[in-house]
Image (cartoon, helix red, strand yellow):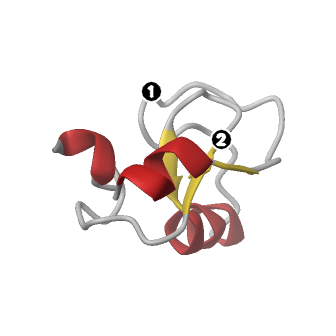
Amino acid sequence: PDAYTCPITRELMREPVVCADGHTYEKAAIEAWFLEDKSTSPKTGLALDSKHLVPNFAIRSAI
C-alpha cells in the first residue's frame, strides 16, 4: 500500500519516521532532504516548523 511507501523515494520504507508536516517518510530520505538545506515539506511544499523526526512504530510494525 501507499502508506508503506516513502513519498520521496517511492520505495518501501524500512525506518519510517513522522516529520513535522504529519507525513511519514523513510528516515534516510528525509534526513538527506534536510541536508540539502531544504526546510519545506516534501509532500506539501509548506515551511516546516521543525526538523524533529519521530519513529512511526505503527507503520514499521505493519510493514
Q: Residue furthest front?
A: 61
Q: Quadrant of the C terminus?
A: bottom left
Q: Residue furthest left?
A: 1
Horizontal and vertical percent for residue 39?
70, 45
Residue 44: mark: 1
Residue nearest the observer in this picture, 55 or 37: 55
Disc 2 residue crowd, few under 14, some 14–19, many 20+, Cα 10 Å: many
Q: Nearer the viewer, mark 1 or mark 2?
A: 2
Disc 1 residue crowd, few under 14, some 14–19, many 20+, Cα 10 Å: few
x 28%, y 54%: residue: 5
Type of amino acid at the residue the image marks with label 2: Cys
- Mark 1 / mark 2, whichever is N-terminal: 2
Q: Secondary structure at mark 2?
A: loop
For residue 11, side relative to residue 47 (left or right) = left
x 37%, y 50%: residue: 62
Separation of disc 1 and disc 2 at Cα? 12 Å
Residue 19: mark: 2
Type of amino acid at the residue the image marks with label 1: Thr
For residue 52, side relative to residue 2 (left or right) = right
Horizontal and vertical percent for residue 40?
61, 39
